[in-house]
Image: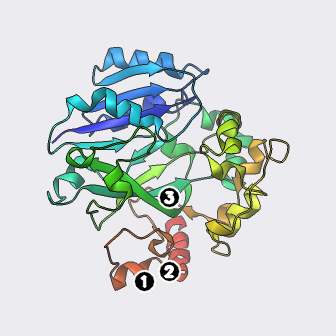
């Protein structure tokens, strides 16, 4: 079994070295498509490729973002995979908690895809306090797990797909046709992954500038044009609002640009005590087709338990 990474990047130089080194601990090959970085990301990819030939800098092309760009990577390297292999959507700001090699080795041969559950870290009021006290704590060479410690979990989606079910994979689709149509059996257990979209004030402002065009055009990053972003997200993490209820801005003048607009009250988030324990909020996650949650899973994800765990983690 080999794992092939489909990596689409743009302006991720602050975290890419850390994330690719982490991914290579379990991913046999990482194929990188840079769709227009201006911060040295592409040069860093080439440097890392010289150090590790399993990192493949496929191409740099300044094209508008769309999830189906990863399909181009797949078609360029599909002949390197064989039956039993896996393809993974590998984003530059994600770090797996569970070892994908061990996890996928336990997945039955009849299963064609695996969902991940994303543990999303926010730049909280506590991170902002630390930044004002010492900006050096958020320098690019600081381990990402030391920068951001507050998270919330409310999303899950397909991340790994067996090579046998990838054909046909239309060029305009983010995943193979069979996966999108629900014709592929999904593993009932989710693999856990840390996600660090908001890492430092400089990176947050670069992120907003980089993703604004896609957010406003509707090709991606819709979550960045949420109206009253901080208030809306805080209502989400306190479970007073659902994602479908969000309002969205329609033009760049209505978007919130400063990094302070992405700061979330730490008291609403879960503190990562680096003890390997994560609150996954199963009741907020989209259901895996055909999978059922056990009573203990439902119980451990309720709001009361989440609050208790947060305080225990901080003690």
Vertical position of residue 108 compared to residue 32: above or below: below
Q: Residue at x 46, y 40 (%)?
A: 68
Q: Can you identify the residue that label 2 sits on?
A: 302
Q: Earlier in the sequence, mark 2 or mark 3?
A: 3
Residue 169, given in percent of the width and then of the height, sits at 34, 42
Distance in Å between CA atoms under marks 2 and 3: 18 Å
Secondary structure type for disc 3:
loop
Q: Is residue 135 visible?
A: yes
Crowding at mark 2 (Cα within 10 Å: few <14, some 14-19, many 20+): some
Image quadrant assignment for residue 88: top left
Residue 167, given in percent of the width and then of the height, sits at 27, 43
Q: Residue at x 34, y 14 (%)?
A: 50
Q: Can you identify the residue that label 1 sits on?
A: 299
**Discs 2, 1 touching: Cβ within 8 Å:** yes
Q: Earlier in the sequence, mark 1 or mark 3?
A: 3
Observer-nearest residue: 3 or 25? 3
Residue 89, given in percent of the width and then of the height, sits at 39, 43
Secondary structure type for disc 2:
loop
- In the displayed orientation, state which residue is furthest to the right: 253
Color scheme of the displayed model:
rainbow
Labels in figure, total:
3
Q: Which mark is residue 272?
A: 3
Distance in Å between CA atoms under marks 1 and 3: 20 Å
Q: In this rendering, which labeled residue sits more in front, label 2 or label 3?
A: 2
Q: Which mark is residue 147?
A: none
Crowding at mark 1 (Cα within 10 Å: few <14, some 14-19, many 20+): some
Q: Is residue 19 visible?
A: no
Q: Quadrant of the N terminus?
A: top left
Observer-nearest residue: 114 or 258? 114
Vertical position of residue 210 compared to residue 252: above or below: above
Vertical position of residue 58 compared to residue 14: above or below: above
Secondary structure type for disc 1:
helix
């Amino acid at each position: 079994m080999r794992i092939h990474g489909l990596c689409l990047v743009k302006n991720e130089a602050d975290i890419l070295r850390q994330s690719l080194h982490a991914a290579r601990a379990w991913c046999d090959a990482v194929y990188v498509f840079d769709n227009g970085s201006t911060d040295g990301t592409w040069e860093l990819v080439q440097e890392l490729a010289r150090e590790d030939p399993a990192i493949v800098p496929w191409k740099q092309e300044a094209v508008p973002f769309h999830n189906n760009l990863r399909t181009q990577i797949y078609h360029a390297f599909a002949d390197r995979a064989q039956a039993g292999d896996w393809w993974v959507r590998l984003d530059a700001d994600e770090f797996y908690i569970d070892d994908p090699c061990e996890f996928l080795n336990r997945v039955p041969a009849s299963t064609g895809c695996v969902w991940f559950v994303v543990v999303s870290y926010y730049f909280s009021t506590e991170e902002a306090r630390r930044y004002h006290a010492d900006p050096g704590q958020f320098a690019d060479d600081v381990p990402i797990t030391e920068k951001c410690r507050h998270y919330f979990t409310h999303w899950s989606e397909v991340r790994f797909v067996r090579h046998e079910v990838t054909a046909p994979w239309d060029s305009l689709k983010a995943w193979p046709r069979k996966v999108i149509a629900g014709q592929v059996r999904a593993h009932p257990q989710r693999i856990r992954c840390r996600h660090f979209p908001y890492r430092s004030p400089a990176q947050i402002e670069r992120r907003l500038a980089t993703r604004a065009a896609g957010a406003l055009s509707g090709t991606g990053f819709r979550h960045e044009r949420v109206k009253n972003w901080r208030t809306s997200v805080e209502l989400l993490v306190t479970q007073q609002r659902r994602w479908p209820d969000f309002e969205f801005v329609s033009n760049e003048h209505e978007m919130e640009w400063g990094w302070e607009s992405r700061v979330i009250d730490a008291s609403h988030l879960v503190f990562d005590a680096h003890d390997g324990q994560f609150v996954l909020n199963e009741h907020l996650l989209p259901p895996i087709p055909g999978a059922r949650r056990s009573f203990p899973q439902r119980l451990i994800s309720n709001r009361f338990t989440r609050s208790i765990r947060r305080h225990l983690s901080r003690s």
